[in-house]
Image (tube, rainbow, N blue to C red):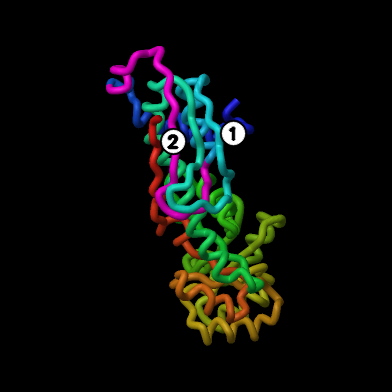
Amino acid sequence: MLLDVLDEELLHSVRIAVAEDIGSGDITAALIPEHLAAQATVYSREPAIVCGMAWFNAVFAELDGRVSVDWLVRDGNAVQRDQPLCRLTGPARALLSGERTALNFLQTLSATATLSRRYADAVADLPVRILDTRKTIPGLRNAQKYAVRTGGCDNHRSGLYDGILIKENHIAAAGSIKDAVMRARKDNPDLLVEVEVENESQLLQALAAGADRLLLDNHTIPELKAAVTTVAGRAGLEASGGVTLDTVRDIALTGVDYISTGSLTKNIHAIDLSMIFE
């Protein structure tokens, strides 16, 4: 089998992507004799961190079970320009029909993993965790979050259902930070409770209310340092806003525990890949 694990969500996204591209049928591939077999190799045209093998495999498994994919690398491997990634053999029609969809998954997830590796490397010697956000490609959230981990960073909450992040509008609706945290604890006692704070007063209120983590959005470096001193380990501190590869290390040096950035999943550059038929 091409897939080690048949993940239903993965297969669902692959089937949607295949149907989107092929529709009622690949009329160009139909020009090729049905019995003709072919071989092809996928190359990376730039340095990258590979990610997305399972999605790539699933595209061809969906089209024709006779396609074989022999991987020369694994998810998480660093590759160089013009390095071969895998070799495919099987019916020529299936290879041609699946080429673009399979490469789309691989180039996008590899892009996410590649950028995540750059962020992870920038703070590798510091005790901080780089987190993703919910700023993901619709329908590919778990795939991109897998790619973030593959690149060496970590995941924030998956969605609105598995983590509590109390922001300004939540506080206003609840009445106060204290009331919002109390309700969160009552309704979801097993979940981490995070509160976004805009100033020192809110920070102290969130601490007094027993928040597990405080989100410091768009704070300056001096403000982050001051928050670290004030909190003194009584809660986790997460910095966000204005995070780039140029700023992430300075933010990490303030002593915060986490840095979250949507860049990992939304500011990505698709990796240039080519499938060459032999």
The residue mark sitting in front, 1 or 2, is 2
Can you give x and y, in whole percent of width and height, for residue 198 in the image?
Answer: 50, 77
Distance between the Cα atoms at labels 1 and 2?
16 Å
| Label ID, residue 45 | none
Q: Return the residue at label 2.
A: 102
- Please check the rendered image and state whether residue 162 is part of the magenta-colored stretch, yes or no: no
Can you give x and y, in whole percent of width and height, for residue 37 in the image?
Answer: 43, 19
Can you give x and y, in whole percent of width and height, for residue 69 in the image?
Answer: 53, 31
- Please check the rendered image and state whether residue 50 is part of the magenta-colored stretch, yes or no: yes
Which element is circle 1 on? loop
**Disc 2 crowd, CA 10 A, few/some/many (<14, 14-19, 20+):** many
**Residue depicted at 57% across the width and 50% down the height:** 77
Whichever of labels 1 and 2 marks the residue nearer the N terminus, that label is 1
| Label ID, residue 7 | 1
**Residue depicted at 47% across the width and 30% down the height:** 59
**In the drawing, does residue 82 fall left or right of residue 194?**
left
- Which is nearer the eye, 156 or 166? 156
Q: Quarter holding the N terminus?
A: top right
Q: Are marks 1 and 2 in contact (CB under 8 Å)?
A: no
Q: What count of labels does the image hold?
A: 2
Kind of residue at disc 1: Asp
On screen, residue 247 above or below 69: below
Kind of residue at disc 2: Ala
The part of the chain drawn in magenta is 28-52
**Residue depicted at 51% across the width and 49% down the height:** 144
